[in-house]
Amino acid sequence: MNPRQDAAAATSGRSQLIRTVRNALPWYLFIAPASLMLLALMAYPLFDTLRLSLFKWGGLGPQTFVGMRNFAKLFGDEVFWRALGNSFIFAIVVPFFTVSIGLFLGVAISRRMKGWQVYRIAFFIPVMMSGVVVATLWANMFEFNHGLFNTVLRGIGLDGLAQNWLGDRNVALMSVMLVPIWQSVGFPMIVLLAAIEGIPQEMHDAATMDGVNEWQRIWGLIVPLIKPVLASITMLSIIGAMKVFDLVLVMTKGGPAFSTQVLGYYLFETAFRSGNFGYGSAIAVVMFVVVFAVAYGYVRGVRIESVEY
């Protein structure tokens, strides 16, 4: 290729690059505000939390660099390990029941059971309620002397089953976990219902002609076809369960004897109540790593793939 052809090729390449940039520029301008907001509200706090985890700071005054001491302290912190364990229990129990109940409610509503319109609205109402309101409501129902549960048990002669639901370390965590299950079950129900109703009717007709019962229809037809949606909603439920905070704050404050302590509340308690922002930031960093690792491991293990009908 002679110099003239080289120059022509270079000019053509520059022209093509200019056209590409010119065509893409409006789209970059459209996403620029959201990108700047993402950097300001997420990326910067994340990196600043990582920086602050290397310091000792009480919220006011100078920051003292301590290196990895905050993280080393975590390994000997029994409350931290208890909070981590409880967070994992939340991440297993709450998504399992939430998604399972949501799936069966979605299947029942898709079969147009009697009163399905009312059920669809009724089960979704708690999703729209504030977590603090829900926690306050359930804390009153769990109250030992005049709460709804113990009042009903005593009223039907089952006084021996009345419990100090939030004051007994043996049942407190289970009691708290009931609340997000009740509140959140409507979300997977609605999402899975939409996925179920997207299955072609011909497939249901073919299954009916083959003589399958409802259990066989669920496990052999519905679940395989909505598996990508089921996997995605489960992942969101796991992440949400690991970040639980407001329910514990309102209902138990991590007690009794740290039996309901979770990472989110322990972070809040350490940083904002004890004024140890450096150590609290270290907890926040570990919490981020744990949630990211769990989500990444779940996605890699489940392999969310689309299904074509």
Image (cartoon, grey):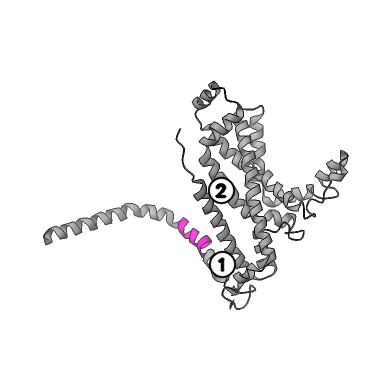
Q: Quick check: can you spot residue 264?
A: no
Residue in view at x 64 percent, y 42 percent: 185
Query: Which of the pair 38/285 is nearer the observer?
Result: 285
Q: Which residues lie in the magenta part?
A: 33-44
State whether residue 62 is above or below residue 256: below
- The residue at which mark 2 appears reads as 235
Q: How many marks?
A: 2
Residue in view at x 79 percent, y 47 percent: 141
State whether residue 278 is above or below residue 100: below
Is residue 137 left or right of 237 when viewed as pictured? right
Q: Where is residue 27 in the image (x, y as percent from the top left)?
A: 38, 52
Q: Which of marks 1 and 2 is nearer the N terminus?
A: 1
Residue 193 belongs to the span the image colors magenta: no
Circle 1 Cα neighbour tier, 10 Å, few/some/many (<14 / 14–19 / ≥20): some
Magenta part mainly helix, strand or loop? helix
Amino acid at pointer 1: Thr
- The residue at which mark 1 appears reads as 49
Amino acid at pointer 2: Met
For the N terminus, the image quarter is: bottom left
Q: Specify the quadrant of the image occupied by residue 112.
A: top right
Q: Where is residue 293 in the image (x, y as percent from the top left)?
A: 54, 57
Whether residues under marks 1 and 2 lie with C-beta atoms below 8 angstroms apart, the answer is no
Query: Which of the pair 295/200 is nearer the observer?
Result: 295
Circle 2 Cα neighbour tier, 10 Å, few/some/many (<14 / 14–19 / ≥20): many
Q: Specify the quadrant of the image occupied by residue 255.
A: bottom right
Residue in view at x 20 percent, y 59 percent: 10
Name the element at disc 1. helix
Q: Position of residue 159 (x, y in %)?
A: 87, 44
Residue furthest to the top in view is 209
Q: Position of residue 197 (x, y in %)?
A: 54, 32
